[in-house]
Image: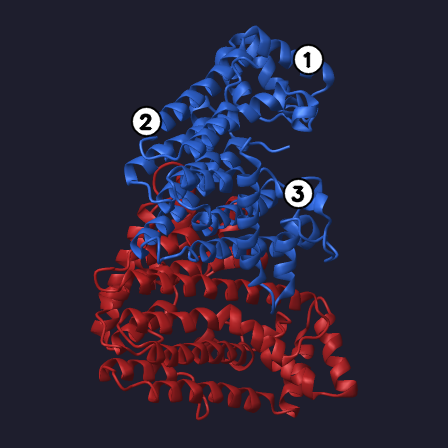
Chain colours: A blue, B red
Amino acid sequence: MSVINVATSARQDFTALLEGELHLSIDKLEGQAPLLSRMVRFHLGWIDAAGDATDTDTREAVRGKRIRPQLAFLSCAAATGEPALAAPLAAAIELLHNFTLIHDDIQDRSPNRRHRATVWRIWGDAQAINAGDVLFATAQCALLRTDTSRVPAETLLHLIDEFNQATISIVRGQVLDLEFERQATVTTDEYLTMIGGKTAAIMRYAAWAGAIVGGATESTASRLGDLGEALGIGFQIRDDILGIWGACEATGKDQADDIRRRKKSLPILMLLESAAGEQAERLTTLYDMDEIDESGVAEVLRLLDDYDIQTRATARVAHYHDVAENALRTSTGSFSEASASDLETMIRRLDTRGA
Amino acid sequence: MSVINVATSARQDFTALLEGELHLSIDKLEGQAPLLSRMVRFHLGWIDAAGDATDTDTREAVRGKRIRPQLAFLSCAAATGEPALAAPLAAAIELLHNFTLIHDDIQDRSPNRRHRATVWRIWGDAQAINAGDVLFATAQCALLRTDTSRVPAETLLHLIDEFNQATISIVRGQVLDLEFERQATVTTDEYLTMIGGKTAAIMRYAAWAGAIVGGATESTASRLGDLGEALGIGFQIRDDILGIWGACEATGKDQADDIRRRKKSLPILMLLESAAGEQAERLTTLYDMDEIDESGVAEVLRLLDDYDIQTRATARVAHYHDVAENALRTSTGSFSEASASDLETMIRRLDTRGA
């Protein structure tokens, strides 16, 4: 099942282009210090912990949705650029994302990712830090493979600068996310600032940079950047909603899983801002406990209901849906129709109003 | 006391240029997530852990020798380039170095660096990982401030590519260094490969890139790269020698400190390769113990003496001194004499034969 309902042929094209670039990047890590290449290839799902090649099913399962590189490809295509031109960019974005995942897993002490052990759990924190670091450097090298006979060198320098600015935003978001865990109260505004960095900055960059590589003007690219950012925030809030009310088959998690994990996601923060007196106190008490039992979970769900949080959070997603749609509408002057429609399909997933 | 005896005015010039670029880089981190900027500014010695500005003495003590950015400046000047042209490059190199220091301290569980607590010890591993990550991105942004009206955009892209290749080499070296700690035996060749990545890659890059920015041909820059690499390996081995036989006032450490810390530095690895039978076993036993007492230290020193290791290690340093000197001699065609002489002074520090 693909997240984005792009025409199958285009999707296969994107996948093949991305895989090619990723292998080109990672193959360069062979040689001295084989552990380094092994950790990275394991994390990407290409090999198991013993070093043996994985089967196709495992590879596809570990690969993830690849929404970020797809956005770069679609944005490039929308600007009537050839997809191949965006392949180094797409690989750079995917490698950057994976660098942050490896470090996040250490920071969050996550034992598993996509049903496999995390890098730090197999090789220890110290070597996992190295695996993340090398992916960041490798991401930059991938971006530098952009064809400068078709993308001017000055433009590529601009793309590299924004790539690193986006990374700084991601790290900022991660700093805030870790601080929130120790903080007594977090406002919804603070939360939106955090995901604006941690989740949306790379989506903005993917859409903006894809358009630039595809030959769009800065103003069109900037509108597509707005689209990417709105998608990033919208998808994150949608995930937060699914983490509480999502059906098991859609998310692979149990319903109310995020409540059981006492995750302070947006719906809970909205509830904390809305609830008063006794109810707010009760909620804080529940979230301060080591574990929430099933009656506690039911209690939180009731409170969320009392304050109509699902509807209100869904309205927030709808807002980002509208921002993204508006950004697309106001930037389609020079667009290929097929790609604009693929971007629309991506945006449509955010429209949960009728769902 | 300066490590490199460069004419005072030039040195002050370099320092001011570097400081200016570093502040430009770090000031951009202000804003959201103030903890991020605070960790970085603390690590650089600009503020204390409470956030208050440090005094001049502390700043200078924490600053370190800055041998890497100095090499970039000297190489640029040798190629008759204006030092200011190399300031963004020098800052990028210094920021890259500090990114690796912050992550190394986590990996090595080092409680202190330059007589102050390490970042991870104050703010924890998770946030310290973020501090390192953001310095790496910031380093790339610094390099991108190179004046493209005087260094062609294509050349700058090449400089960025090699910057990231050097980083990959550094991470490789760090992977090996961590692996060596768990390995029963390490050969001197393996050790040299490790420091070739961990220590020498950035020195090669600094000398090469400084020359390129200064307008040198690729062939001259490559000779200066050889010089930088030889300096990097030579200085590391010299440090290893000083760690065992260095007088207290020169190193700030006790004599034989590296033996007490059971550090498998080059002299010890040379001894392990030379000693046979009972002596080799005895050495291995001593290095496998939790602690070496003073009679053990004296025993190791006697063994090192028996196999003439100090003389032989010093001869290795002399070899790298000669390689560096030769690289300078064969590349001085288009050179400014003053800068070549500054580079010679840097090389001369390696000539410990008469010391």
Amino acid at the residue labelled 1: Ala
Q: Residue at x 40, y 77 (%)?
A: B225
- Mark 1: secondary structure: helix
Decide which of tag 2 and tag 1 comes sooner along the chain. 1
Number of other residues with Cα within 10 Å of mark 3, as a class: few under 14, some 14 to 19, many 20 or more: few
Q: How many marks?
A: 3
Amino acid at the residue labelled 2: Thr
Residue A330: assigned label: 2
Pinpoint residue A16: horizontal percent, then vertical percent.
57, 48
Looking at the image, residue B296 sits to the left or right of residue B323; the answer is right
Looking at the image, residue A334 sits to the left or right of residue B233; the answer is left
Decide which of tag 3 and tag 1 comes sooner along the chain. 3
Amino acid at the residue labelled 3: Glu
Q: Chain of mark 2?
A: A
Are labels 3 and 1 on one chain? yes
Disc 3 to disc 2: CB gap under 8 Å: no
Query: Mark 1 highlights which residue?
Result: A298
Q: Chain of mark 3?
A: A
Query: Mark 3 highlights which residue?
Result: A60
Number of other residues with Cα within 10 Å of mark 2, as a class: few under 14, some 14 to 19, many 20 or more: few
User: Do we see residue B109 in this rendering?
Assistant: no
Q: Residue furthest top?
A: A306
Residue toward you, B334 or A331: A331
